[in-house]
Image (cartoon, helix red, strand yellow):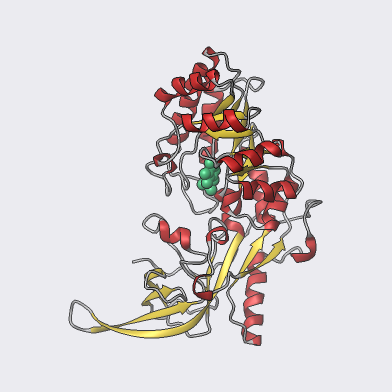
Amino acid sequence: MEKLQSPARDIHPDTRNGLHPVTLLNRNNLTLLDTGTSAEQFLQQKISNNIAQGHQDAFYVADLGDIKQKHWRFMKELPRVKPFYAVKCNSTNEVLQMLATLGTGFDCASMGEIDMVLRMGVPAADIVYANPCKQVSHIKYAAAHGVCKMTFDCEAELFKIAAFHPKAEMILRIATDDRDAWCALSSKYGALVEQCEDLLKTAKNLNIQVIGVSFHTGSGCKNTHSFCKAIEDARKVFEIGKKLGYQMRLLDIGGGFSGNSEFRPTFEEFADVIRQSLNQYFPNNKEVEIISEPGRYYVESAFTVALNIITKKEVYEKGADGNSRRKFSYILNDGVYGTFLDFYLVKEKQKLKPLLGKDFATEQELFPSNLWGPTCTNVDKLVNEFYLPELETGDWVIFPNMGAYSISMSTTFNGFPQPKVYFVLSKGDE
Ligand SMILES: *Cc1c(COP(=O)(O)O)cnc(C)c1O
């Protein structure tokens, strides 16, 4: 059984000092926090106001300052690598604007995502169309808008590119060992190193440009060694490409890094291993441009969602000893069809840890508690038998680290709306 966590105190301990000049960012929807005010305090204030005014709607607080901090950390740890943020992870306008302002590129997987990013004024050269399997109309759209960098992992894709985007600069996606990751993407994408020579020969015969290699070690990657192996394999494919006359000049190391500070290995540990492997297999900066496609890393910790308990139910259950025990079910106003779909899909691997919107005495008795979403289905369950003090209808439950694959996946099934997002900008290091 998991133990109760005390309510979060410092979601963003590292936000200090002045503001970075944000040029693109539309500040109308943004609350600028004073020095000394954290996103956590903003959230507590919002909850107090909601209680005072009788409002129950679930809401997010998103700290764009946290995203900025993540960016500086990325640049510091992996100075040779340019991040292309994976748009699918969280495509809210403010997030994309913040990242565009910071100067990241973007990893897009569809016409819709490319369109969103181009509309913000991001140059086509800062987009990698990193979906190896693309619909023809989307390829034509990319061609018409000058988006040239795109990935492939099979022959069928090459025939489409030859026909509809002859100027494309193709990146060969290779499979990785991602068995330990939350989402093992290589079960769907990526050519084996042994297949690459034939693919590159086909590309050559079709007069298609190939500029490099990409991989993804799986979303929520747990194993730093996956990167060593993938970078080593990428080198092998570079050599095959060169032998066939290609000038291989781009390495794309994908995403997969968690953005949650409790995740192990840490980003720094991954970065150490990646730096070493890059120095070993791609020592020459002039020969190769290195990019990455982080999603979770940038947005996970920036978003916190606060849900209201709309109904409390007591459940009586007989334990193994024949004695009945007290247990509670709480129905919250967002769930698996909303913010928590990704958690549901990989729930064996990720565990949700709710925090409470009010303080409790440490000696207070804890009861096994189930937390459910609001829709009328029995799969809409967030947390099973978590030990919590007795809560009441109207109390607030808080889930930090909810920025990745939450809003971007959520539905309005059963008529439940997506929680509103309050964007704040905490002060951080320049
Ligand atoms: C989803 C995806 C990413 C982002 O993965 P994270 O685990 O969120 O970093 C990057 N590249 C590709 C090709 C993806 O499909």
Residue 337 in picture, x, y percent from top left:
48, 67
Residue 136: percent from the left, percent from the top? Answer: 57, 40
Q: Position of residue 244 (x, y in %)?
A: 53, 14
Residue 168 in sight: yes
Which residue sits furthest left? 321
**Residue 276 visible in the displayed image:** no
Residue placed most toward the observer, 321 or 148: 148
Residue at the spot x=47%, y=62% of the render? 341
Q: Is residue 197 left or right of residue 285?
A: left
Q: Residue at x 58, y 81 (%)?
A: 56
* Front in this rendered view, residue 208 or 96: 208
Q: Nearer the viewer, residue 240 or 159?
A: 159
Q: Residue 93's spot in the image, x, y percent? A: 69, 57
Q: Quadrant of residue 48?
A: bottom right
**Total count of labels:** 0
Quarter of the N terminus within the rendering: bottom left
The answer to whether residue 308 is left or right of residue 176 is: right
| Residue drawn 62% across the image and 20% down it | 284
Please name the residue shown 39% across and 59% down the image. 347
Q: Residue furthest front?
A: 163
Q: Is residue 32 above or below residue 296?
A: below
